[in-house]
Amino acid sequence: MSALVVLAMVGLWAMLGYLIWRLTFSRVLRRGMVRLSLGTAFAWTWLLAPWADEWLGAREFRRLCEEMPEVKFFGPVAMGPGPFFDEQGQRKLWTQREIESGKSPFAGADIKGAHSRGQDFEAAWRREFERKTTRHRVREWPTPVLEEVNRYFHISSGKLVRESHWLGSPGGWIKRTSGWGNHAPYSCSKERDALSHEAWITY
């Protein structure tokens, strides 16, 4: 559907350009080579102009991504005995890495129990840490760019543990009008550089 919208918009734009050429410049320019040269230049300029903000915006977005701050880590947080450590400082629940990789202390012998411990870890983690997100526009032109800053806090102490940035843009006006820009076709972050959750806590 979006492709049809774009094609219709391009067709209407081309037709409008043709009418402008016929009603203005073509009546003034009579000589063959001059008319052909200027007509070709007008056609290329007219057809490419709607994409100018897309091209300029993509370049600006790449620059902003290169300047994006690194992920900042201010941990680990000392937890002491509780849901994650016993009195001897041994881990009681899975680490996040073990959950994501599918590994567990049960080694596949107790799937139901393994799933339960994974849920216990997630529930305990949400009680200890919270994420606060702020969003604001850093650019309006040539294309809008949204910055999202995610900060993770240790709830009981209020300590900032981690901060990361994300940039997103819906692209130029054609993408925004056609709906292609609804899911931020341009985005970047440095989440890949983040430490796994097991590095967030220590005894």
Image (cartoon, rainbow, N blue to C red):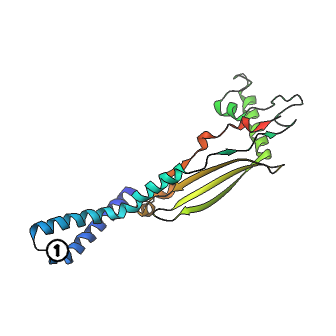
Is any atom of residue 118 visible in this view?
A: yes
Q: On the picture, is 128 further left or further right than 146?
A: right
Question: How far across and down, in percent of the image, does residue 69 sit?
Answer: 60, 49
Q: What residue is drawn where x is 61% and y is 43%? A: 191
Q: Circle 1 sits on which residue?
A: 26
Q: Quadrant of the C terminus?
A: top right
Is any atom of residue 1 visible in this view?
A: no
Compared to 35, does 89 lie above or below? above
Question: How far across and down, in percent of the image, does residue 138 sit?
Answer: 56, 61
Query: What's the residue type where badge 1 is placed?
Result: Ser
Q: Residue furthest front?
A: 67
Neighbour tally class for label 1: few under 14, some 14-19, many 20 plus, Cα within 10 Å: some
Q: Quadrant of residue 133?
A: bottom right
Question: How far across and down, in percent of the image, does residue 144 sit?
Answer: 50, 62
Q: Quadrant of the N terminus?
A: bottom left
Q: What residue is drawn where x is 56% and y is 53%? A: 167
Q: What residue is drawn where x is 15% and y is 65%? A: 36
Q: What residue is drawn where x is 36% and y is 61%? A: 51
Question: How far across and down, in percent of the image, does residue 34 sit?
Answer: 14, 68
Q: Secondary structure at mark 1?
A: helix
Q: Nearer the viewer, residue 31 or 187?
A: 31
Q: On the picture, is 113 further left or further right than 55?
A: right
Q: Residue furthest right?
A: 87
Marker count (numbered): 1
Q: Nearer the viewer, residue 187 or 112?
A: 187
